[in-house]
Image: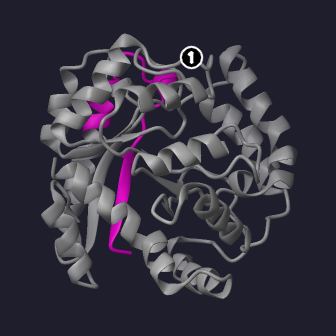
């Protein structure tokens, strides 16, 4: 592992009015980790930090991000403070916010503020991330953006009909724009069968939270064990999504995402980030040539981060 995104996620429903402070604390925690483990972690503020990590096997570039623009509190000016703190990737929304609609919400697109936020990110050198964004918001970003953007943890909807996954049209467009999608290692993103079985638990989770019957943590305690009890899908599904993405969007548009701390289940054989090393063999054994494997495992995201962060 040479680079990893450290996502600061604040669930707005349980942090109303404190989103900014909580997210800033998380970013500062990433900074502190890098200071405490300076022999291994480099806090990545620019392309040179990522390149330095790639050159030394013991080094990992830590890229700070916001998963959802809720910490901006609806104010574009707050992006500057997070940029100064080192944030270099912004997932526009986890759930609906003043900037962007999501698949977990009403499905609306970018607001005017959201359009301005995309433009400001590009000016600063912050990578725009459309994972969680609604289908409409995805194409709004396509319309507004001038630089490559990412879907950091989204898979192929043609294989698993999870709303968080990308349609073929989205994958094709992402590839045409020089963007990259990161294959999500969550079972429900990889497997249509798993997604169908977990959907009822997911729907009940959001219903209970939105109705005020349970807090987010209480609902998670209810749904988590149900999802974990579903048989895990095969490791080979990762290859299936990678090959489909390459077929539709080209070999430059797909990389490895993760979401390992955001899912209850991963495929058999993938129990931690250490198992990412197995993916190289899976891809080579599945018919990808070494050039393509290099791009998927690191080259495509490396190219995008260096380009966008370097402005």
Quarter holding residue 10 = top left
Position of residue 197 in the picture relative to residue 264 (left or right): right
Position of residue 176 in the picture relative to residue 224 (left or right): left
Neighbor class of circle 1 (other Cα within 10 Å; few <14, some 14-19, many 20+) is some
Q: Which residue is mark 1?
A: 108
Q: How is the image coloured?
A: one colour
x, y percent for residue 270: 64, 73
Residue depicted at x 18% and y 20%: 77
Q: Secondary structure at mark 1?
A: loop
Vertical order, 110 against 128 (above or below): above
Picture quarter with the N terminus: bottom left
Q: How many circles with numbers are drawn on the protein? A: 1
x, y percent for residue 251: 51, 66
Vertical order, 35 against 166 (above or below): below
Vertical order, 303 against 81 (above or below): below
x, y percent for residue 302: 32, 65
x, y percent for residue 207: 74, 22
Answer whether residue 5 is magenta in the image: yes
Residue depicted at x 79% and y 64%: 232
Answer whether residue 152 is magenta in the image: no
Vertical order, 73 against 234 (above or below): above
Question: Is residue 162 or residue 249 the one in the foreground?
Answer: 249
Residue depicted at x 49% and y 24%: 14
Question: Is residue 78 or residue 160 the one in the foreground?
Answer: 160
Position of residue 212 in the picture relative to residue 179 (left or right): right
- Res. 35 in view: no
Quarter holding residue 76 = top left
Magenta stretch? 1-24
- Res. 245 in view: yes
Residue depicted at x 72% and y 73%: 235
């Amino acid at each position: 592992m040479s680079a990893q995104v450290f996502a600061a996620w604040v669930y707005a429903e349980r942090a109303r009015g404190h989103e900014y402070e909580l997210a800033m604390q998380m970013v500062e925690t990433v900074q502190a980790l890098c200071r405490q483990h300076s022999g291994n972690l480099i806090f990545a503020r620019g392309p040179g930090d990522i390149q330095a990590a790639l050159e030394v096997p013991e080094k990992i570039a830590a890229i700070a991000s916001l998963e959802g623009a809720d910490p901006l509190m609806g104010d574009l000016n707050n992006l500057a403070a997070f940029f100064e703190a080192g944030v270099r990737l912004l997932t526009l929304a986890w759930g609906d916010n003043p900037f962007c609609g999501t698949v977990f919400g009403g499905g609306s697109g970018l607001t005017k503020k959201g359009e301005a936020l995309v433009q400001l990110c590009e000016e600063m050198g912050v990578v725009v991330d459309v994972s969680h964004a609604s289908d409409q918001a995805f194409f709004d970003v396509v319309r507004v953006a001038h630089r490559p953007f990412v879907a950091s943890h989204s898979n192929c909807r043609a294989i698993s009909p999870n709303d968080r996954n990308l349609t073929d049209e989205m994958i094709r467009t992402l590839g045409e724009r020089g963007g990259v999608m990161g294959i999500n290692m969550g079972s429900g993103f990889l497997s249509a069968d798993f997604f169908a079985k977990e959907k009822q638990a997911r729907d009940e989770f959001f219903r209970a939270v939105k109705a005020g019957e349970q807090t987010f943590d209480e609902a998670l305690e209810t749904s988590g064990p149900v999802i974990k009890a579903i048989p895990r899908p095969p490791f080979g599904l990762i290859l299936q999504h990678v090959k489909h993405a390459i077929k539709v969007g080209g070999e430059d548009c797909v990389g490895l995402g993760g979401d390992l701390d955001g899912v209850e289940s991963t495929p058999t054989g993938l129990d931690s980030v250490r198992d990412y090393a197995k993916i190289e063999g899976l891809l080579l054994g599945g018919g990808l040539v070494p050039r393509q494997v290099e791009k998927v495992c690191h080259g495509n995201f490396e190219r995008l981060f260096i380009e966008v962060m370097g402005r």
